[in-house]
Image: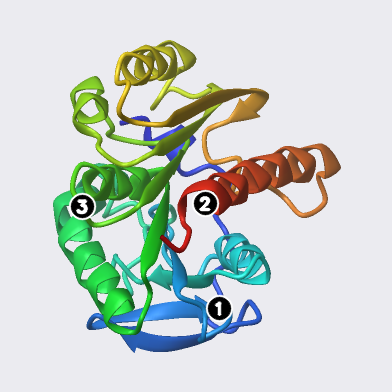
Amino acid sequence: MSGIQCCENPPALSSISGTGHVEEIGGLKCYVSGPSESNLGVLLASDVYGYEAPNLRKIADKAAAAGFYAVVPDLIHGDPYNPNNAERPLPVWIKDHGTDKGFEDAKLVTEAMRSKGIVSVGAAGFCWGAKVVTELAKSAYIEAAVLLHPSFVTLEDIHAVKAPIAILGAEIDKLSPPELVKQFDEALQAKSDVDAFVKIFPGVSHGWTVRYKEDNEAAIKCADEAHKDLLNWFAKHVVNE
């Protein structure tokens, strides 16, 4: 795994960012935003920097503004990756935070969301979280999935996906390069029973949707476009039956 690209532009983490609040759902701390009376839910699975990343919470707030009950669970249990800790490089951190454990935790959160009255759940995953969401999409846990600059996702995973899935890739990405994303697209086009949308954003790097810099207008514009694609996908598939 290319630790350098995966961890570019680390966010300034803050537990008080966003317009929502933190509560426990499914045994995990979660940032929650949106109308509690909504029966349409969205789960956002973070990258290695975790659920306190301000830009990630802004995406949850956007989903909330679109009418979804948005939940960002702390799938890494208060232990975000710290690029300044030379004694714990990314491969070591990953061993402590496998996506398999993230998947098990995410299942608990989706189940808890449904127990609150949510009838349809979409899940979006960023980098590390994209693998978690892919596992959800291989089962009946969610109604729709969005992967944004995914890490660890394989062609075999894509072949096994059952839920409608959108994949938003970056032109400059060593973790899921355009060649691999195009293979994902070809595999999904061959699955007539799964609705799919695949898009590669030109001129952007891995992590661009959540780790853009606030003073970079071009980066913000590209991130906003991806966020709109995410919300459009959920508007299409996360619906009342």
- Residue 140: which disc? 3
Mark before the other along the chain sequence, 1 or 2 = 1
- Which three-letter amino acid code belongs to the residue tagged 3? Ala
User: Within 10 angstroms of label 3, few (less than 14), some, or many (20 or more) residues?
Assistant: few
Please tell me whether mark 1 or mark 2 is closer to you in this view.
2
Q: Residue at x 18, y 23 (%)?
A: 156
Which x, y percent locates residue 72?
A: 43, 69
Please tell me whether mark 3 or mark 1 is closer to you in this view.
3
Is residue 138 shown to the viewer in this render? Answer: yes
Question: Tag 3, which secondary structure?
Answer: loop
Q: Residue at x 79, y 41 (%)?
A: 221
Residue under label 1, please give it. Answer: 33
Mark before the other along the chain sequence, 2 or 3 = 3
Is residue 77 shown to the viewer in this render? Answer: no
Which x, y percent locates residue 228?
A: 67, 46
Please report contact status of discs 3 and 1: CB closer than 8 Å, yes or no. no
Mark before the other along the chain sequence, 3 or 1 = 1
Residue 166 or residue 38, whichever sits in front: 38
Q: In the figure, is residue 228 to the left or right of 206?
A: right
Is 120 drawn above or below residue 197 in the view shown? below
Q: Residue at x 25, y 64 (%)?
A: 106
- Which three-letter amino acid code belongs to the residue tagged 1? Ser
Which x, y percent locates residue 21?
A: 53, 87
- Residue 89: which disc? none
